[in-house]
Amino acid sequence: MTTLLKEKILEENRRVHALENQLYLSRHPEQTNFFQNFIAEKTLDQICCDLDANAKILDLGCGTGYLFLRFLRRGFNVTGIDLSNEMIQVLQNSISESEENRAHLTVGDVEEFFERNQEDFDLVVFSAVLHHLFDYEMVLKKACQKLKTGTKLMIFFEPLKQSIASSPRYTLHHGLSWIDETFYRLQMRMRNIPLLEDEYHHSDYQRQFGGIDPRNIEKVLREENCSVLNIEKYCARRSGITAWLANRILKTQNTFNLLAVRN
Ligand SMILES: C[S@@+](CC[C@H](N)C(=O)[O-])C[C@H]1O[C@@H](n2cnc3c(N)ncnc32)[C@H](O)[C@@H]1O
């Protein structure tokens, strides 16, 4: 039963990301708007200043290269793994000839990757991928067990599982979300970009449980001899303006980033 469900989730991820491919980031402006772009660049600045120039970075579930390309353009050696051949193809086409010797791409399941990989990395990244996994705890455990002392682990842009008190602040939060989604739909229709919402089914599996609880991740990491250095919680929105309002005025949260190190 468990194996069947796990296979189904993998299959749905392959199917839905084959459809996403080159329009992935156009369809997900919550990752590219000015507010999120600022968070991504700030986070990378903080992490990269501790890395050697020839550091090796592993981007698990790299997709079309949201973080992969940023690391590559900062001069690092980057290895990317993704289940979807189509997403990897889009990423491959975005890599210039001068960057090719530092970029390594593989199609595959993150879980299997850890079973056969012997290589050491200085930074391991999961960006918007844990919520797509059937058993993210087990994958995190396997990842930690393969890390050498001092390796950093970054979890980025995951949906935050939290209990929300029914406060006026969160009523406004939902109102703002409604406005944001309405404009988003209109914009996608005007740009002729099909929404794939009805295609997702089980592919972002952890969302049906309300997202991912960072306290749970902390527990797993502690058990695997890692220390959490930082957790950042914030509100992601389709548009930069609504993200700015949600974070600066309402101060609500729905997303988190986490940085840890292997002891
Ligand atoms: C939401 S996208 C995020 C892509 C990219 N990391 C980013 O931040 O834009 C999730 C990615 O995880 C990949 N994925 C899902 N399940 C996976 C698995 N078991 N192994 C490897 N990749 C997986 C999908 O194919 C997709 O490209």
Image (cartoon, rainbow, N blue to C red):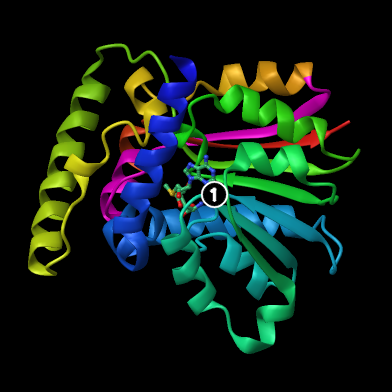
Q: Residue furthest bottom?
A: 97
Question: Residue 166 vs residue 147: left or right?
Answer: left
Residue 163 is drawn in which quadrant? top left
Callout 1, which amino acid?
Gly
Quadrant in which the C terminus is drawn: top right
Relative side of 17 to 50, left or right: left
Few, some or many residues within 10 Å of mark 1 (<14, 14–19, 20+)? many
118 relative position to 260: left or right = right
**Callout 1: CB less than 8 Å from ligand 1:** yes
Task: Residue at 26% x, 24% y: name it.
Answer: 169
Examine the rendered structure and indicate whether residue 177 appears above or below residue 225: below
> Which secondary structure lies at badge 1?
loop
Of the 4 image quadrants, the one containing the N terminus is: top left
Q: Where does label 1 land, which residue?
A: 61
Left or right: residue 1 versus residue 186 is right
Range of the magenta residues? 224-247
Residue located at (74% from left, 37% from top): 115
**Is residue 169 or residue 88 the one in the foreground?**
88
Q: Where residue 230 sits: x, y (%)? A: 67, 34
Q: 116 and 169: which one is in front?
A: 116
Q: Is residue 182 magenta?
A: no
